[in-house]
Image (cartoon, coloured by chain):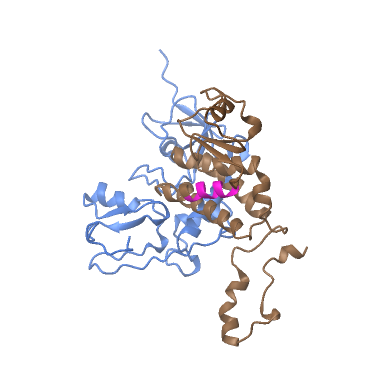
Chain colours: A brown, B blue
Amino acid sequence: VRIQQVLEDCGAGDVVAVQISGPSGVCLTPDEFRRQIAFEDVPTSGAFMVFGKDRDVFNVARNFAHFFAHESCGFCTPCRVGTALIRDALDKIADGRGSRYEINELMRLADLLKRTSHCGLGQTAGNPIRDTLLKFRPAYERRLIRGDFDPAVDLDAALARAREISGRDDADAHVDTHIGAKA
Amino acid sequence: MTAPDSTILIDDVPVSFKPGQTILEAALEAGVFIPHLCFHPELGAHGSCRLCNVIVNGRNISACTMKAASGQEIEVDTWLGESAQAYRRTLVQMLFVEGNHFCPSCEKSGNCQLQALGYDSEMMTPHFVEFFPNRPVDASHPDVLLDLNRCIQCELCVRASRDVDGKSIFALAGRGMASRLRPTLAPPIGEVSEGEG
């Protein structure tokens, strides 16, 4: 059965992505909808998630990342810490403070989890991140600041207490946190 | 009849093993170092730290849980030809940022396997944002003082107490990043106040 056939049968229009086999499965774009649900092509556990044009694929991936950080049992290092690091990196991007650095880190972490995790949950927890990064890059890129790097600490927010004490709130008492954006 | 071949190749060096030995045990006995934290010769394998991850015949596997078998070709320093050091360093960094590890002020500094693997993997910084978890020291029991700030959840203490002493005074409780070592002599689950553990 082709993906397209399933979508037609259930009357799904304006589909931007289909996630097969749940969060740890594969994310397919419309140009892959001719692929077949089969062990040899797109294996499935029975889960078939359809995302319409009103869905933001970045938020889908971020939701999956939160899911895995919550699901990790905590037995092995890469999954216990890695799923939390992936979650935090996506939260940083969602905050509008992500840069190319986070994208590289996400790919690196997804690779590490796949290779070193003890069980299938950790080994596949990076799949939705890797898939959406490769296939829906614009969903990430439009959230990135233009610079190469932005500190994880919000410098301006960290100075809030100092501003309060000194009674200042003028422009010079603020840090341009998006330093990279000037470049 | 010829004797069964009992050698494995570790980074192209032949290493002999005894029946029943894991790859890690055979390597250590032969003087070949494979980084590890949760394995201890007297307590056996656990498979949780993932530092001893190696490539066996093309696939990643932890050397502490994989039994040695003749004909295995094992890569320790490289994974499929690529340096494995960056992967191990990342795992060590994960353990560092997850807990509260301040080597200069730690009494274990200089005699610490985690610190040693930091040096071994040429770790220069924690790299990731520190989680700085709040892990209060528990000195409420007359015999046990529990400082979880350095805990890497290797369960060596759990296994030593259970398997050597036969007392099982420690256990891991909770899930994911929230899992913590707990003394089993603490009030049972249900009697613990909200937000704890």
The vertical placement of B55 against B138, above or below, is above
Left or right of residue A107: residue A178: right
Q: Is residue A59 magenta?
A: yes
**A56 vs B146, nearest the viewer:** A56
The vertical placement of A8 against B42, above or below, is above
Query: Going 41% across and 63% down the picture, which residue do you hit?
Result: B149
The quarter in which the C terminus of chain B is drawn is bottom left
Q: Which residues are magenta?
A: A58-66
Q: Is residue A95 magenta?
A: no
Query: Going 57% across and 44% down the picture, which residue do you hit?
Result: A129
Q: Position of residue A174 (x, y in %)?
A: 66, 76
Q: Is residue B32 at least partly visible in the picture?
A: no
Q: Position of residue A68 (x, y in %)?
A: 47, 47
Q: Position of residue A146 (x, y in %)?
A: 73, 58
Query: Going 33% across and 45% down the picture, which residue do you hit?
Result: B42
Q: Quadrant of residue B183?
A: bottom left
Q: Position of residue A58 (x, y in %)?
A: 59, 48
The quarter in which the N terminus of chain B is drawn is top left
Q: Quadrant of residue B108?
A: bottom left
Total labels: the figure holds 0
**B171 vs A68, nearest the viewer:** A68
